[in-house]
Structure formats: C-alpha cells, structure tokens
C-alpha cells in the first residue's frame, strides 16, 4: 500500500499518540485535501494537505501559522544569550517556525509565528499597512490635544509617525491602531506626548484577534483566518494553490 498511515503522520505533527490520532480520525475531525478522512487512509506527507479541526496540521510540507498570546517578560528573538524564555520556548511545533515581527520583552499580546517566509515578509514590509491594535496603559490621562497629536503623527527621532487611530477607553487607557512597525513605536509615540507607557498589549494583527487566548497560550490559525490574512496582504492568488477548499 502506498503512503503513510494518517495516524502516524498526525502523531509526528504533534497531535498525541497514534491511538489518540486514530480517535481524531474516527471523530471526523481530520481532512485530507478537503475531504473527511477515515481510519485506514494513507497519505503522502509531502503532498497531502491535512487539517485537524479546520486548521492545517504541521506536517513538513505544510505552511503553519500559530497565534500566541505573548506574556510579559518573554523575548521575541529565536534564541537569547541571557537564557531568558523566548516565544519559541512557548510553542511546540514539529516544524521550525519563527515570529513575524517582534514585540518588546515587556509587551504582551498577539504574535504570529509561522514557517511561511513570504507571508512574514509581506506582513512586515513597510508597504503592508496592516493595522496593529494595542491597548495602552499610560501614566496620567492624555488630553484631547495629546490624543489628536498621536492621531495626526508625532515627530520621533526616526521621523514623523503616520496617522494612527487613537481613542481613549478610560482614564489612562488608550486604544491605538498603527500601520507601521518601527522599533518601540507605541511607547515612543506616547512618551513624545508626555505619557510613559506602563503596560502595552497587542490585541489585533490585521484580521486576527482572540480575546480568549490566555497569556502564554497559543493555537493554530483556522483556514479562514489564514485566508483573511493572505487577503489582507494581497496574496489572494496564492491561496487557491496552497490551501484546502
Ligand atoms: N510598540 C511598542 O512600543 N512596542 C511593541 O512591542 C510593539 C509596538
């Protein structure tokens, strides 16, 4: 018989023992190339597109996408010479993934990790204009004038910031959406209008948000989330060839 038993491929992709992977198959939670799999199915891990609960399984040929809620104190680099916990320490993936962009060590919230270099490149490219939303706790309570400056653009040492969406949620708490990705941008913008940031949480990356993900937890993106992300960066043509229907 051709190919590898599906439960073996799934077990290698991190879905537990072969026995528990058999259960996933029996429960109808696994698809191969868009069709519900059955026990006994064999796959070619280099060709088949395998999904579990609608999310692509991390088999070597698949591009995988994880959404992590980064906790405070974790670094976004792949390895840290000082031995601090990195975002890669938090994510168990049988294929090597890397973070898309970075959050400061003290910034919390959503971070995308993937092995899809093209998407990562498009998301982080200065021309991407993907909106990234932050909840920002600041010292003091920004005045309407300070909020207007944040919206219209503030002069930083690397130039004027682009227009941002800024609203006051409550005393000392702002919601800021920026479309650039400069180093420590939100912290520097707020400091420039006289309000140091005391807590920064990213709550949305383009179409991706998830208020139910606990700090330190992660999950795979669903196929429709990947689709929306591709659309947001203009990769719609790629979808047809690489994603299940
Ligand atoms: N802006 C910042 O200042 N820090 C981050 O981590 C992200 C955006």
Image: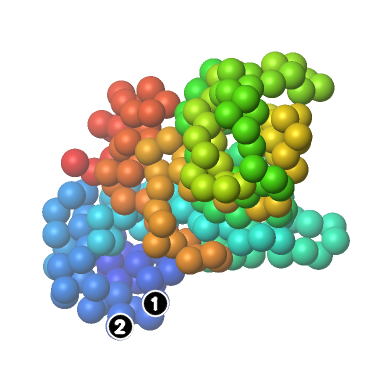
| Residue 193, percent from left and from top | 72, 30
SS assignment at label 2: helix
Q: Is residue 229 above or below residue 219?
A: above
Q: How many marks?
A: 2
> Residue lying farthest bottom?
19
Is 39 left, or right, of 87 in this rendering? Answer: left
In the rendered structure, the answer to whether residue 60 lies left or right of residue 92 reads: left
The answer to the question of whether label 1 and label 2 lie on touching residues, with beta carbons closer than 8 A, is yes
Quarter location, residue 156: top right
| Label 2 CB sits under 8 Å from any ligand 1 atom | no
- Report the residue at 41% width, 57% height from top: 211
* Observer-nearest of 50 and 207: 207
Residue annotated with mark 1: 16
The percent coordinates of residue 68 (x first, y second) are 51, 56
Specify few, some or many for label 1: CA neighbours under 10 Å numbering under 14, 14-19, or 20 or more.
some
**Quadrant into which the N terminus falls:** bottom left
Residue 205: x and y in percent read 47, 40
Circle 2: is it few (<14), some (14-19), or many (20+) Cα within 10 Å? few
The quarter holding residue 30 reads bottom left
Report the residue at 57% width, 48% height from top.
171
Residue 188 visible to an observer of this rendering: no
Label 1 element class: loop
Q: Is residue 221 visible?
A: yes
25 left or right of 113? Answer: left
Of 233 and 204, the residue lying toward us: 204
Give me the disc on residue 19: 2
- Mark 1–mark 2 distance (CA, rounded to whole Å): 8 Å
């Amino acid at each position: 018989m051709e190919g590898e038993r599906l439960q073996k491929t799934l077990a290698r992709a991190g879905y537990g023992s072969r026995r528990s992977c058999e259960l996933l198959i029996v429960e109808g939670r696994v698809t191969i190339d868009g069709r519900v799999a059955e026990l006994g199915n064999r796959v070619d891990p280099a060709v088949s597109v395998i999904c579990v609960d609608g999310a692509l399984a991390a088999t070597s040929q698949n591009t995988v996408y994880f959404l992590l809620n980064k906790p405070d104190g974790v670094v976004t680099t792949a390895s840290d010479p000082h031995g601090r916990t990195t975002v890669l320490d938090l994510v168990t993936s049988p294929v090597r993934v890397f973070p898309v962009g970075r959050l400061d060590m003290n910034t919390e919230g959503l971070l995308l990790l993937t092995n899809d270099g093209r998407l990562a490149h498009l998301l982080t490219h200065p021309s991407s204009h993907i909106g990234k939303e932050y909840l920002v706790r600041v010292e003091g309570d920004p005045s309407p004038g300070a909020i207007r400056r944040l919206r219209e653009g503030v002069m930083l040492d690397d130039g004027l910031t682009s227009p941002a969406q800024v609203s006051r949620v409550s005393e000392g708490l702002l919601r800021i959406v920026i479309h650039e990705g400069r180093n420590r941008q939100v912290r520097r913008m707020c400091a420039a209008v006289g309000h140091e940031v005391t807590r920064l949480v990213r709550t949305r990356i383009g179409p991706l948000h998830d208020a139910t993900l606990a700090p330190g937890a992660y999950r795979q993106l669903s196929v429709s989330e990947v689709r929306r992300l591709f659309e947001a960066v203009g990769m719609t043509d790629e979808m047809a060839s690489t994603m299940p229907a």
